[in-house]
Amino acid sequence: MRKIIHVDMDAFFASVEQRDHPELRGIPLAVGYDGPRGVVATASYEARRYGIHSAMPMMRAKRLCPHLTVVAGSHARYKEVSSQVHAIFHDYTDIIEPISLDEAFLDVTENKKDIPLAVDIAREIRQRIREELHLTASAGISYNKLLAKIASDWRKPDGMTTIHPDRALDFIAQLRIENLWGVGPRTAEKMHYMGIFTGADLRAVSLKHLQETFGKMGRVYYDFARGIDERPVETEWIRKSVGCERTFLEDIYKTSAVIVELYHTTEELERRIAKSDFVGHTLTLKVKFADFTQITRSLTVQHSLIDKDDILPVAKRLLQEVNYGPEHPIRLLGLSVSNPSMEAEAHRAEWVEGFLEFTD
């Protein structure tokens, strides 16, 4: 049986700032752009007590905590510290799957130190992160990625949880469906409508019904409810998409202004595609409105989407499907290119900050 560890750094960006700048310790801190359209990238645990969380508009965060301290942060610094964390991982195994700068899966079934118990490896890794980097991490240990990820979230911050195979089904049964890896807000809402609120409820639904409702993801949910997750820890990450988005200082609704911003977003996407050497065939337009509701529209084409001459006409076509105006202005535009293999799917599964979210 596999031995999988999921390590998740605690409030990573904020913790690095507090470690490097003693004057920031013990106070509510947010990392992100401190402007009218800024969002919180990471909040310290002192800030989270006020209800502040990542992706929250910075203006709202400051209303919740008027004495909140905001720092812009340094991605280069966080990447450097992340490399130091991974150097510790590599002392135990080279089978490592990074999810983001602050979390990763480790397969320690066979490890470099021949430590028989995965929990002892996780404990040692967390201790070294604390002693060598002066940061804290939470860890989850189990026999697959699904349960290891859930376990790492169970006792955050600075916690460790093991889900043994003989207790996995009971553990999943009592989980709120929102805590099951792969169930985002829209999927949870749909499941609630079906009377599914816990892992036990999900397990009671037939595979046929789940597939009829969720398409390909139905099989995933059916397996997850039973503690089944055969995905390996993948050391080589294959890029599935390239994207960018722009949040405007003021909401826009005039067609001329929207087209101009769409053009600028397309130019930025073109630069990112060239930098990543990516070739895709599906363009997705994301629109977030002033009331924070958002929609996506996608279109798959036969030709490769590489430069703005390829992308802009498709983006304009997608924009025609969006209803906006003075009563429904636009706050953000985003574009992404995906589908490098031309596999147009009726239902698309996206990994977002490590979580699967079913999209219609």
Image: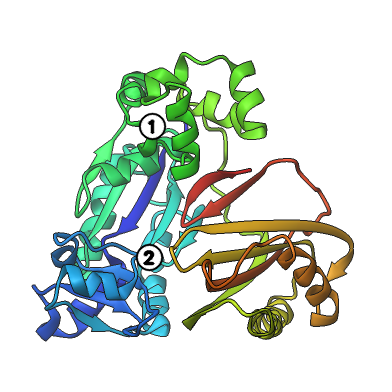
Q: Is residue 170 left or right of residue 219?
A: left
Dot 1 falls on a residue whose secondary structure is helix
Q: In this view, does 253 lie to the left or right of 13?
A: right
Please provide percent x and percent y for residue 158. 19, 54
Mark 1, residues whose alpha carbon is within 10 Å: few (<14), some, or many (≥20)? Answer: many
Query: 218 or 18: which is nearer to us?
Result: 218
Please provide percent x and percent y for residue 326. 54, 73
Q: Are marks 1 and 2 in contact (CB under 8 Å)?
A: no
The residue at which mark 1 appears reads as 177
Quadrant in the rendering for residue 51: bottom left
Which amino acid, by three-letter code, is at mark 1?
Ile
**Residue 15 visible:** no
Residue name at image x 67 percent, y 33 percent: 216
Above or below: residue 200 compared with residue 77: above
Above or below: residue 38 compared with residue 181: below
Dot 2 falls on a residue whose secondary structure is loop
Which amino acid, by three-letter code, is at mark 2?
Ala
Query: 53 or 169: which is nearer to us?
Result: 53
Please provide percent x and percent y for residue 139. 30, 48
The residue at which mark 2 appears reads as 55
